[in-house]
Image: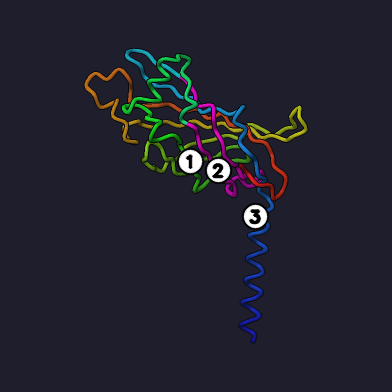
Amino acid sequence: MKNGIKRTALTTALLLACSHVLAEADAYRIDDSHSFANWTIRHVASKTSGTFSDIKGKILIDAKNLANSSVEAKINMLSVNSSHAKRDKNIKEEAEYLDTNKFAEMTFVSKKIEASSNTEGVMTGVLTMHGVAKEMTFPFKVLGFGNDPWGGYRAGFEAHTALKASDFGFAWPLKPDAPVGDDIEITLLIEGVKLPPASPIK
């Protein structure tokens, strides 16, 4: 009887602890009209840049303890924009490049966050692109929180990382004297809109 009471008490305590952690984390929907995944890559002797502008997902953030936060995001590869329509068409359609007919989305799911302060930390998660899933770790910053002009409440985030296209199965960098490089620099500028408690995230 006593063991049963102890187990019940322990279970209740664990549930309360989990509920407390969840209660501290606020949910934000990524606003794709104010969020960008910007990229830079070598082209011949210089560099070219562009962005993916269609980013959707959710961010759970505990402002008091960033380690309790998490991110799930997906990027529509068809939203690539290098400010050159013909080049963008080739990037999207050619099998050598994004091949969006087969691989229309890129996804990222965080696994762990290590906070160095209330506004900075290092995030580890799984990036899936071009049919390949790889674990990545990169630094991020919480830029701030504030009311928007439409009656909502927003949070801003910034992150920087780099990856090799060849690690995700892309063949273009492997050609002799390839005009397009292997190393891709990424800057993430993300804005989230706070959701009411228990509101579904689409």
Quarter of the figure with residue 85: top left
Label 1 vs 2, first from the N-terminus: 2
Q: Quadrant of the C terminus?
A: top right
Q: Nearer the viewer, residue 83 or 14?
A: 83
Q: Is 5 included in the stretch rendered in magenta?
A: no
Crowdedness near tag 1: few (<14), some (14–19) or many (≥20) residues, C-alpha within 10 Å: many
Crowdedness near tag 2: few (<14), some (14–19) or many (≥20) residues, C-alpha within 10 Å: many
Label 3 vs 1, first from the N-terminus: 3
Label 2 vs 3, first from the N-terminus: 3
Q: Nearer the viewer, residue 81 or 119?
A: 81
Q: Which residue corresponds to mark 1?
A: 108
Classify 131 as above or below 52: below
Q: Is residue 202 left or right of residue 99?
A: right
- Whole-number angstrom distance, CA of label 3 to CA of label 1: 23 Å
Callout 2: SS:
strand
Which residues lie in the magenta part? 50-76
Q: Position of residue 131 (x, y in %)?
A: 37, 40
Q: Nearer the viewer, residue 128 or 7?
A: 128
Q: Which residue corresponds to mark 2?
A: 71
Query: Are circles 3 and 1 on residues that touch, CB within 8 Å?
Result: no
Q: Position of residue 34 (x, y in %)?
A: 62, 27
Query: Are circles 2 and 3 on residues that touch, CB within 8 Å?
Result: no
Q: Is residue 82 left or right of residue 63?
A: left
- Whole-number angstrom distance, CA of label 1 to CA of label 2: 8 Å
Magenta-drawn stretch, dominant element (helix, strand or loop): strand
Q: Which residue corresponds to mark 3?
A: 21
